[in-house]
Image (spheres, rainbow, N blue to C red):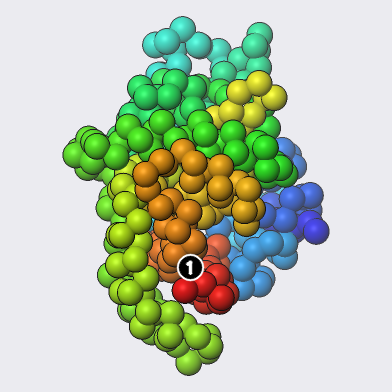
Amino acid sequence: MTRTVSLVLVDPAGDLLGQLPPFTVGTPWWQEVSDVVAAAGIDVTVLRVLHGDRPSPPGGHVTYLAMTSERPAGLLPADAGLAPHPLRASYAEPAGASASLAWAAGALDRIGLSGTTARQQRTWNLSAIWRFDHPDSGPVAWLKQVPPFFAHEAAVCRLVEAVAPGLTPYVLAAGDEGRALLAHVPGEDRYDAGPEFRRAVLTALHPVHEHFAGRLDDLRAAGVPEMSLEKIFKVAEPHLATIDGLGDLLDDLPRRLAEVDGCGMPDTLVHGDLHMGNVISDGESLTIVDWGDSVIGNAAFDVVRLPGDPDLLAAWADLWPGRDALRAATLLGPVEFLRQAIVYAGFMESIEPSEWPYHATDVDRCLRTAVEQAGGHP
């Protein structure tokens, strides 16, 4: 699957220049923009999605707003609404993107990494990411900027680094408006990881879970939010008539959570999005990335994100002697997807409408998965 792209161009002051003719890129995912930048034919910074020709990714024809200091010939007329929006991320505006790149370049200069080149990788409502390459040594750092609801990510990485060095990307600098400069992590994501690697991830994360189980105030001081299911009834209400079994699951939720409490598992730092695409490995070490979803909650929430594997669950439960960890994970399987539904609903409340297609089906998908997960479980 490919993606057709149109770029509406503005200059660094935000003045409209026109539109480039459409072109095709190989990756269908709208937030991935490295190939868009490479195929544009001029130096551009992609700012945000303006609209797409389908309700949600992937593929289709997507129109972005992009910034350039060039004035290419042959631009097509463009009629794009450029009015400000109160929920727009700062990096989705020309001045904000320019300020972030200047901040990162200055931070790199101060630590002796001058002469790098910024290469944009991603931009959407959850982050803007640039990789910084040095002419002699290749990738050396990443600039990641996140919206306010993920602003605790850099602080969490520093807390985890102090407990388990190397388990998170090293924070070279942290700035205002959700900016963080992270040291490059060699390796590849492990979406295809098998049970042995997943077990290694859980084993590496366990000391972090143990450490912060007794230090929740440290997490609160760093801005880590506390997990709450209070909004689930409001989020689920529009879906009760279309998802069979959802009402029964919600009615049973108090009983289920009371049983979880009886399992003796502690509240601690939960990564919140622990799939293997968020683990980078070079074959010798592993690094867990993307801590923006981290929350204070039951330690079992991280293990239930992994594919069903009885041996994996049993090995993880063995890390918690004296507690009924396996029972807690079983009970929380459906609850994790209820929690995710709340998270995605929160995203929709916190981003401008042009960004909604990224999450258009997520709430419904999570609620349906929660009901499926509850099938057959007490």
Instruction: Give whichever of 308, 224 is nearer the camera.
Output: 308
Determine which residue is flagged by label 1: 334
Residue 215 spot, x, y in % from top left: 23, 36
Amino acid type, label 1 = Pro
Residue 344 spot, x, y in % from top left: 44, 64
Above or below, comparing residue 250 to residue 261 in the picture: below
**Mark 1 burial class by Cα count in 10 Å: few <14, some 14-19, many 20+:** many
Residue lying at 58% horizontally and 28% vertically, measured from the top left: 286
Residue 45 spot, x, y in % from top left: 56, 40
Report the residue that reaches farthest toward the front: 322
Residue 114 visible (yes or no): yes
Residue lying at 56% horizontally and 75% vertically, measured from the top left: 376
**323 relative position to 1: left or right:** left
Above or below, comparing residue 34 to residue 226 in the picture: above
Residue 296 visible (yes or no): no
**54 relative position to 292: left or right:** right
Instruction: Give whichever of 158, 252 is nearer the camera.
Output: 252
Image quarter of residue 279? top right
Instruction: Give whichever of 9, 56 is nearer the camera.
Output: 56
Report the residue that reaches farthest toward the bottom: 241
Above or below, comparing residue 288 to residue 14 in the picture: above
Residue 131 spot, x, y in % from top left: 58, 29
Secondary element at image label 1 = helix
Residue lying at 43% horizontally and 24% vertically, measured from the top left: 164
